[in-house]
Structure formats: structure tokens, C-alpha cells
Image (spheres, grey):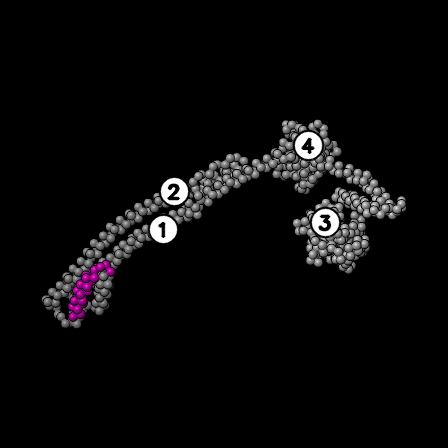
Amino acid sequence: MKLATKGLLLICIPVAVQVVIIVTFATLLWRAQSFAVHEAHAKEIIGECDKLVLDGFQIARKVLKLSGETELVTPEELKMLKTHAAILTEQLPADGMRAEAEEISAVLNSFYNLLMQVRASELASDYKFEKAMFKVIENLMGKISRVIDVVNSQQLEDSSQRQQLEELISRLFFVSVGLCVVLTFGLAYFAYIYLRRPLMRMADNAEKMSKRLPLEAVPVQGGDELAQLERLFHDVNDAVNDAFERERNLITHAADVVCSIDEKGNLINANPYTSLLLKFDEDELKGASIFDMVSAADCAKVDSLFQTSTRSGTTRVEEIQMVTKDKTVIDTAWSIIWSKSDQSFFSVVHDITERKELERLKQDFIAMISHDLRTPLMSLNSSFELVESGAVGEVPTEAKPQLSRAIKNTEHLIDLVNDLLDFEKLEAGRMDFDLSDCKLIDIIEQAKGMVESLAATKHISIVVEKCDHRCRVDSRKILQVIINLLSNALKHAPESSTIAIKTRTLGDKIEVSVHDRGAGVPEALSRSIFMPFEQVAGDPTAKLGTGLGLAICKLIVEGQSGTIGVRTSDFGQGSGFWFTVNSAQS
């Protein structure tokens, strides 16, 4: 049964019972009222009969001169007699005595006629008149007595029925009170069973859920909304338990230190990996000071990290050196957040020892390239150029192509080394930018002049859109970016085509874009093309580059608060590489 149906029953049943009781009482009271009206009507009839008898006797006494009076009957007395007679004959049919009313009316007419004859002195006081008068009066008295007897008998019967009705109303009152009491307790029990008990069970389950205790089972029966809500509550509890279990497993099996630390820096809880990383037993970790596991040089850094997290409520990552039980130093990255509700720090510590070792190897590799590879390559390239110029003797004709290729390969290697060194400096944030106000068109024209010889070999024209924008940039680095984008465009543009350089204002930024008519960059590579060593697969010109040019451009532009990207060329074919720089006004 649905909850709405149960609620409807709780409302409709008492209302229906009350309506039945009210209708029953109204019917009985109406019947009692009808008895009262009928009794009052009977009293009125008897009263009119008494008045009619009294008026008749008074008139008869005058007519028969029984009172010693000698005056005649007055018109007012006759009128009063006629009025009482009319009222009586009007009331009798209402009690089902139409025949009696007609008979009384006929007798009264005879009596009235006799009186009128006396009034007109048509009759004298003789024996016949008196006999007729007595006969009429006797007949009238008989009719009125009969009416009074009938009315009295009906009144006695009505009185008996009214007494029975009053007893019935009294009994019905007590029965109704008892029924209402039983109904009230019954509906209260119904509400307790089907409404209050499930709500209490859910409240109890909610408290158990907050304490992570097993919930009380849901009864199998029941298909109303409360039962569905209870089942849903259990499903939510199961889902929460599953989530807690997954979170617990995630923390337990995580390859990072996950721990909670009190305000004094003592460990409260830690996952099993903590013991594995720091080589302490679990019992040794509980209550141990985290500062005893941090190198002396980084203790102040940890304290500052705690204070910052407490004050701002934010988290930041900090590299900290930790010391294991066997005094081994490991590099770690800490992330800490302060919990006001628990009054403790929650920290995730990631072991970055291998990453730091790789960074050191990378630095050694870069240093090796810088000192041990670039210098010999430049010396070798100078020697090749010296030989090609004929300074050490005439070069055989068949050796010139091989010598030219050797020079180009050496230059390619030098470019690769230079790009690698620039990329490493930019990525590490060790390259400084010398910002100044510059005319953007001067930088673009300078870049165009530096690649015009390469453009001439492919009969490509470079068109520069005139502009008067002033920007605040490192002109030498932005020049490198434009040259790189123009070089890419020249590699991919077909011979005898056009490359366009355009500028436009975007708020406080200025956009510079280079457009060609080449094959273009696939949409899937529009973002990854700026990653190191990322090139378009199958592009025959890819082997001509180092794969670092666009990555270097991205680092230079973003290092000066700009953005870089690629879209379809304004020619409708090819690529449109663009980047933004700050205007001088910004």
C-alpha cells in the first residue's frame, strides 16, 4: 500500500465515521424535532377546542337565558366564535382529521345559523328552538370530544416514540464516543506501525551509519515510499561502505606516505607504506615526531609548511629531504592540508628520489652536451668549412657533395644541441627575459630579412601586414619565435606560394600569426604539436627539424604571459600559427 493511500485512510476513515455519526444524529434530532412540533400542534388544537367550547357555552347561556342576562349576542362574540372555528378546522387536516374538521365545520354552521336567526329575532324562545339548540351543542361537544380524544391518543403515542428516540440518542452518543476512542487508538496504532516505526528505524539507522555500525534490517514486506526509502537508505549505506573500503584500500596500498599529524608534529596515523619507506616499525611510528624523520636542513621548511597550511587553509607542494631509520637520505614531495574539525594535518608524501636522480643525470647530460659535444662539433664544422673554402688545398670534385652534406649534418647537430640547451633553460625557468617597449613591425621585418634567402630558394614571397603596434617583450626571444614559425612555414609551404604575417589587437594583447598554404596540422595534433620532439607523422619535412622548435616557442611566449596555438590558415589551406604578447599600454 502506497504512503499516500495510508495517509488517505488516516484522514478519510475518521471523517467518514464522523459524517455517519453526524448524519445519524441529525436524522434522530430531526425526528425528535418533528415529534416536538407535532406535540405543540396538538396542544394548539386542544387549546382551540377549549376556546371553542367555552365561547359556545357562553353564547348558549345568553341565548337560552341561563345566566339571567337579557341582552342579545354581540357581533364580536359571533366573530370570535367564527374565528376559533376557522382556526380549528384549518389545523385539523394537518393531523389527518379532515373528516372531523368537515363535521365540526358543518355543526358550527348550523349553530351559527341558529344564532343568526336569534339575532334577527326570527325565532322566539320556544321549546323547539331550545331543543334544536341543545341538539346542536350536544353534537358539537361530541365532535370536539372525539377530536380531543384522537389528539390525546396521538400525543401519547408520540410521547412514547419520543421517549424511545431520546433513549436511542443517548445510547448512540455513548456508542459514538466509544467508537471514536477505539478508532483513535486503532488509527494511532496503524500510524505507529506503518509510519512512526519506519521513521524511528531510519533515524536509528542514520545514527548507526554515522558510527559505522551495522544497520537494522528492512522488513521484507512493504511497498510504500517509506519502505522504498529504507531500502534506498541501505543502498546508500552499502555504497558509502564500499567507498570507505575503496578509500581504505587506496590508502593502505598506496605507494605514497599517507598520514595524519597533530599540531605538535607527532604522527597520529600512517599507512603501511610509511613503514616500508622509512624502515620504521608501525609501533615506532605511532606518536613519533615527524621532525625526527626530516633532515636538519629542511626542518624549518616543514615548520613553515605547517604554519602556512594552518593560517591559509590551502595546500602547497614542498620538496623535503627525509632520513630513514638506517640514516639513508631520500627526496620527497610533501602536500599538507589542515583540518579544523580534526585539529590535525593530513599529509601525502611522495618519494621523488628516483626523479631527483634522473634530474641530476639530465643536468649531467646537458652539461656534457654543452661542454663535451657542442665545442667539438663547432670545431669540426669550422674545419669542414675551411676545407670547403679551399684554404687547405683544392677539394676533389667528387668529394664536394659529401663535404657539403657533412657540413649540413654538422650544422644540424649544432642546432639540435643549441635547441636542447635553450629548451632545458626555459623548462627549468633559468632563462631571464629582458622586457622593453618595442615596435612590433621592426621585430617582424628583422625576422623576415633573416629568412628571405631561404624563401628565395623556393620562390616563396613573405607578405607582412603593416601595423603600428607597440609591445612590451624581450625582442630577441620574440625574434627567435617569429623566425622559428617562419622557418616551419617555409619548410611546409609549396614552392612559388605566399606566406603572410598578420597582427591584430585583442584587448590588452597583440596577436601575431603566420599563415602558409601547406598541408596543415591535423586537429588531433593541434595541442600536442607544441610538445618536445612532437612532429606530424608522415611529414617528409619532419626530418629537417629537431622537434624542439615549437616547444621552445611555447616556453618563450608563455614565459612572457602570452599564449600560442595553431588554426587553419587564413588562405583556407595550410596552417596559421599564432601567439600573443602584451601591448605596451598593458
Q: Residue at x 68, y 49 (%)?
A: 525
**What's drawn in magenta, residue-wise?**
94-117
**Quadrant of residue 304 within the rendered picture:** top right
Type of amino acid at the residue the image marks with label 1: Val
In contact (CB < 8 Å): disc 4 and disc 3: no
Type of amino acid at the residue the image marks with label 2: Gly
Query: In the rendered image, which residue does mark 2 sit on?
Result: 186
The stretch drawn in magenta includes residue 100: yes
Categorize mark 1 by other alpha carbons within 10 Å: few (<14), some (14-19), many (20+).
few
Type of amino acid at the residue the image marks with label 3: Pro
Query: In the rendered image, which residue does mark 4 sit on?
Result: 290
Type of amino acid at the residue the image marks with label 4: Ile
Image spot of residue 317 (x, y percent):
69, 39
118, above or below 184, in the image: below
In contact (CB < 8 Å): disc 2 and disc 3: no
Image spot of residue 357 (x, y percent):
73, 35
